[in-house]
Image (cartoon, rainbow, N blue to C red):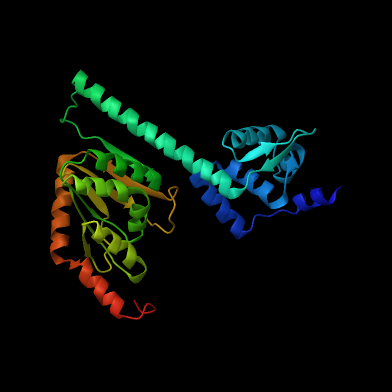
Amino acid sequence: MSTIEQTYNAINWTAGDSEFIARLTNFDLSGKEAQVYLQLLKYGPQPLSLLAQSLETYRGDVHRTLTYLLDKGMVNPSLESPTVYVPVEVDIALDAAVKKCEVEFCEKKRLKLELQEISRQLRFEVSDKFSAFKILKSMKDVMNVTLSNVASLEKEWVAVVPSILTVFSSLYVLEDDKKFIDRGGKIRFLTDITYPYVDIIQQHLDMEMEVKHLDKYSGILFCVFDRKICMSAISANLKHISLNEPLSVLYTADPDYAGYLMSTFELLWKRATPASQRIEELLKEEPSQA
């Protein structure tokens, strides 16, 4: 048995490896694809047989995975026989993945506008006699729903959210929020402002969002769009900034439930502290105590 084969047989994923794989899945890679790509990065170009042996799976399974990675620009095949698969440098591979997502996102936005125009021409009417409820199961689902609603908002959206969600907002929704505010919209949200999130909260304030501090709030987390569409968390113990972070969120266009959440929000808003005041208090304290 060669030295390389012995190395493969001794492989165990470290904590760092597992984190790297988890992050890769945010770039539209499956767990298997991420494992194969990491294997090639760690141990260099390898033929199909050694990859299958090291990952303790079937050659056909690895071959399919490599085909997907080739299509995504993550690996390149050699011209020699047997074929050796070479990993593309991380920066180059991820840049390509980001550009692909940007192109797909722009295309979906264009298609959405076309479908909206066609629906207006066809005069579709959705009955308001029944309320539809849907369960969102990941942060990616929540961000997609939020972006979709912000694009069609007319007046205002409000939210009571954990601090970590302000990070998601700055990464995925902030640009769309700015466009909504520029066209006359209003955004208000409540959160427990702590020292690590001061800069992000200030970023929201600079965009003319209205933000207040709700000290150690542990009640229901929710948001309401134009007082008629809403999301409320069933379980949302967020620990990581990842679109694949699991959670359970109720999404509905039920006007009665939206009205109940709006009433709750207004009560909380009245007793909350302005974000600017809270930030001033935190900055006066030592960071280690804030």
Q: Furthest residue to the top?
A: 122
Q: At which x and y percent is residue 269?
A: 16, 61
Q: Furthest residue to the right?
A: 1
Q: Is residue 103 left or right of residue 283?
A: right
Q: Quadrant of residue 55?
A: top right
Residue depicted at 32% across the width and 67% down the height = 198
Residue depicted at 83% across the width and 52% down the height = 3
Q: At which x and y percent is residue 15?
A: 60, 59
Q: Is residue 283 left or right of residue 267?
A: right
Q: Above or below — where is 175 with respect to 164?
A: above
Q: Above or below — where is 266 with respect to 182?
A: below
Res. 28 in view: no
Q: At which x and y percent is residue 132?
A: 24, 35
Q: At which x and y percent is residue 233?
A: 30, 51
Q: How many marks do you count on the picture?
A: 0
Q: Above or below — where is 71 with respect to 92?
A: above
Quadrant location, the C terminus: bottom left
Foreground pick, 152 / 262: 152
Residue depicted at 72% across the width and 40% down the height = 52
Q: Above or below — where is 33 with respect to 217?
A: above
Q: Quadrant of residue 65?
A: top right
Res. 24 in view: yes
Q: Quadrant of residue 255?
A: top left
